[in-house]
Amino acid sequence: MNIKLSALAAGLLSISAQACNTSHNLPGQNIDLYFGRNSAQVPTDQVLKLANWAIDMRLRYPIQEVLSIGGMAEASEKEPKKLAMQRGEAAKTMLTQFGLDQVPYDVRAGIYKPLRHLVESPAKVRRVEIELSPGCPNNCCDGK
């Protein structure tokens, strides 16, 4: 009798191990916010864009692993490192106001340094890059 129970238990364990043998999460969800020169104030159109995105993320992904926020500034802007961080913090504040307040945040700042062969327009450089990493209810996403 013990041999049959042991075999059954081993069989069930092997089935569940095949179904999910490691932790997985869904692909990250991204949005960029754009700012005026030397400004950390989020323009009205970008506030609306972020509000809609935050609501969509809350509805689609009830489990959020982390929100990564990267504030960017041009090197020629006034106090670019400080400005980049202010932009990131402004985005974080708004995201918490829009209901993404139960997720850990990673806020960082960077100064855009153009590569010779790839130069973005200044309007696209002054931005905050946001990525939400959604989690799965059972921490084992299988696409179903």
Image (cartoon, rainbow, N blue to C red):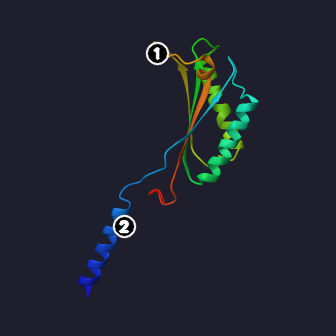
* Image quadrant in which you'd find residue 36: top right
Is 15 on the left-hand or right-hand side of 106? Answer: left
Amino acid under label 2?
A: Ser
Is 78 on the left-hand or right-hand side of 136? Answer: right
Look at the image and tell me whether residue 101 can be seen.
Answer: no
Residue 99 location (% of width, % of height):
69, 47
SS for dot 1: loop
Residue ID for mark 2: 16
Which quarter shows the N terminus?
A: bottom left
User: Residue at the spot x=31%, y=68% of the render?
Assistant: 14
Residue 5 location (% of width, % of height):
29, 82
* Image quadrant in which you'd find residue 22: bottom left
Residue ID for mark 1: 115
Residue 34 location (% of width, % of height):
65, 26
SS for dot 2: helix
Residue 93 location (% of width, % of height):
68, 37
Q: Is residue 20 above or below residue 118?
A: below
User: Residue at the spot x=70%, y=32% of the render?
Assistant: 46
Look at the image and tell me whether residue 29 can be seen.
Answer: yes
Tag 2 or tag 1, which sits nearer the N-term? Answer: 2
User: Residue at the spot x=34%, y=68% of the render?
Assistant: 15
Name the disc covering residue 86, or none. Answer: none
Q: Is residue 60 above or below residue 16?
A: above
* Image quadrant in which you'd find residue 69: top right
Is 86 on the left-hand or right-hand side of 27? Answer: right
Q: Is residue 62 above or below residue 93?
A: below
